[in-house]
Image (cartoon, rainbow, N blue to C red):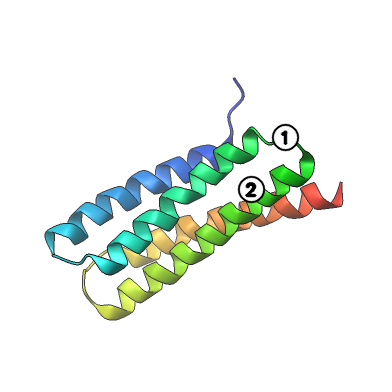
Amino acid sequence: MKDNIIKDKSFAFALKIIALYSQLQENKEFVISKQLLRCSTSIGANINEAIAAESRADFAHKMSIASKEARESLYWLELLHASNLKDFDYTFYVKECTEIVKILTNIVKSTKSN
C-alpha cells in the first residue's frame, strides 16, 4: 500500500497528544487536556473517513473537518501554553500541528479546484 503522509502525520501527532494528555492528567488538569485530546485525535479519524468517502465532495468535506479539528488543536495548545499549567515543548507541538493544517488546507483546495 502507498504511503499516506497526512494519515501518518496525523496518527503520529495523535500519539504525541495522548502522551501529553497523560502527563496533564497526572497534574490534575482535566478540562483543557480533554478538549485537546478530543480534537487532536479527531484529525486522523476524519482523514480515515475521507479515505473511504463516497464522493469527491464527501472527501473534501471530511478533509475540511479534519483541518478545522487541527486548527482547534492549535487553539488548545496555545491556551495550555498561556495558562502555564504544564511545562511542555509548545513550539514542537505547534510546528507539527501547523504542518498538518497546511497539508490539509492544500488537499481541500486541490480537491475543490479539480
Please name the residue shown 21% across and 69% down the image. 86
In the foreground, 54 or 111: 54
Which structural element holds mark 1?
loop
Give the x, y percent position of residue 34: 31, 60
Please name the residue shown 50% across and 43% down the image. 45
Q: Earlier in the sequence, mark 2 or mark 1?
A: 1
| Relative to 22, 96 lies left or right | right
Give the x, y percent position of residue 30: 22, 65
Quarter of the image with the N terminus in it: top right
Please name the residue shown 48% across and 65% down the image. 72
As shown in the figure, which amino acid type bears the numbered disc 1? Answer: Glu
Give the x, y percent position of residue 29: 19, 67
| Relative to 79, 60 lies left or right | right
As shown in the figure, which amino acid type bears the numbered disc 2? Answer: Lys
Q: Which residue is mark 1?
A: 54
Which structural element holds mark 2?
helix
Q: Which mark is residue 76?
A: none
Q: Residues within 10 Å of mark 2 (few under 14, many from 20)?
A: many
3D distance between C-alphas at marks 2 and 1? 11 Å
Whether residues under marks 2 and 1 lie with C-beta atoms below 8 angstroms apart, the answer is no
Q: Is residue 54 above or below residue 99?
A: above
In the foreground, 29 or 83: 29
In the foreground, 53 or 84: 53
| Relative to 61, 1 lies left or right | left
Hey, which quadrant is residue 26 in on the image?
A: bottom left
Q: Is residue 81 above or below residue 102?
A: below
Give the x, y percent position of residue 13: 41, 48
Q: Which residue is mark 2?
A: 62
